[in-house]
Amino acid sequence: MNDIKNADLNLLKTLNALLVTRSVTRTAEQLSLTQPAVSGMLARLRETFGDPLFIRTQRGVVPTPRAEALAAPLRQALNDLQALLTPEGFEPAKAAMTVTIAATDYAQKAVILPLLSVLRAEAPTIRLSVRPVELAVLGQQMEAGNLDMALITPDMALATMCSRTLFEEHYVCVMRQDHPAAQAPLDIEQFCAIDHALMSHDGSKFHGATDAALAKTGRSRRVVAVVPSFLVLIDLVRCSDLVAMVPSRLVAGAADLRVQSPPIAIPGFTKLLTWHERLQADPAQKWLRDVLARCYMPARH
């Protein structure tokens, strides 16, 4: 077998089995073949190696010196090939790698912070690099390997991305605990009469999902401030008489805020985890995706 182009893996497996079992019958059983099939493969092996390889005896077959010399390197070669074909294992506790995730400020608080806690406990040598979501170049970043995954909403996802739904989020109305209107749940008229603040990614839009819902009832609210971050929006509410609609996970357990359901139904959103197809089967990435799916902050209110 002096040319790799002519190598037949089944012949090599048969040769290895014959060296182990010293029996055509047991080799046929081990490989789920017929005895004539094994005998035919032995004939091809003899022709390939230019040696009888095995001599028949009353107790089976006995290897020739050439066959015995082949035993160790053949076993090693088959083991190496099996290792090549077996997916690489992943041990989180020993993994030394940097994972790059794109996330909005909301996802950084609701998902990335819990993820960091899990990584410190289960995979302390994994480093996490968090970047802002840049929709214009998101696909190119993933394809080039500059970004491992992104935490986005379905409207941001590209058709070429693999994705996994993490959770559904809903909005709540927040104000400071000592706000003049904090003593009782807001009705829709009070809701519209109070000054509001709004999150807009580019800081330019004074109209959002809440305004669209109000417009369907012939009502409107007064938005007096727009900021590009939910976290800044919440701090603004803490230090003013403004109220705001924010995702529930951002204010879960916030004792200094009055949190209540809005007096009108406001559409929520889905949080997706997305990645490039080239990382679909990677053991480390699969583990990380599973961790992300179980470590986000629970919804309340």
Image (tube, rainbow, N blue to C red):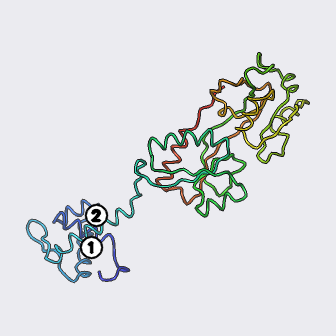
How many numbered discs sit on the rendered protein? 2
Q: CA distance from mark 1 to mark 2?
A: 11 Å
Q: Nearer the viewer, residue 154 or 239?
A: 239
Q: Residue furthest top?
A: 183
Q: Compared to 9, does 103 lie above or below?
A: above
For marks 1 and 2 on the same chain, the one whose residue lies earlier in the sequence: 2
Q: Residue at x 85, y 35 (%)?
A: 211
Q: Nearer the viewer, residue 229 or 158?
A: 229
Q: Residues within 10 Å of mark 1 (few under 14, many from 20)?
A: some
Q: Position of residue 72 (x, y in %)?
A: 21, 69
Q: Quarter-wise, where is residue 300 in the image? A: top right
Q: Residues within 10 Å of mark 2 (few under 14, many from 20)?
A: some
Kind of residue sitting beneath label 2: Leu
Q: Kindly identify which residue carries mark 1.
A: 41
Q: Residue at x 13, y 74 (%)?
A: 55
Kind of residue sitting beneath label 1: Met
Q: Position of residue 3 (x, y in %)?
A: 34, 82
Q: Kindly identify which residue carries mark 2.
A: 33
Q: Nearer the viewer, residue 121 or 164?
A: 121
Q: Are marks 1 and 2 in contact (CB under 8 Å)?
A: yes
- Quadrant for the C terminus, please: top right
Q: Compared to 245, does 71 lie above or below?
A: below
The secondary structure type at the circle numbered 1 is helix
Q: Quarter-wise, where is residue 1 in the image? A: bottom left
Q: Residue at x 67, y 35 (%)?
A: 169
Q: Nearer the viewer, residue 32 or 9?
A: 9
Q: Position of residue 96 (x, y in %)?
A: 45, 54
Q: Compared to 92, does 258 lie above or below?
A: above
Q: Quarter-wise, where is residue 227 in the image? A: top right
Q: Residue at x 35, y 79 (%)?
A: 4
Q: Residue furthest left?
A: 58
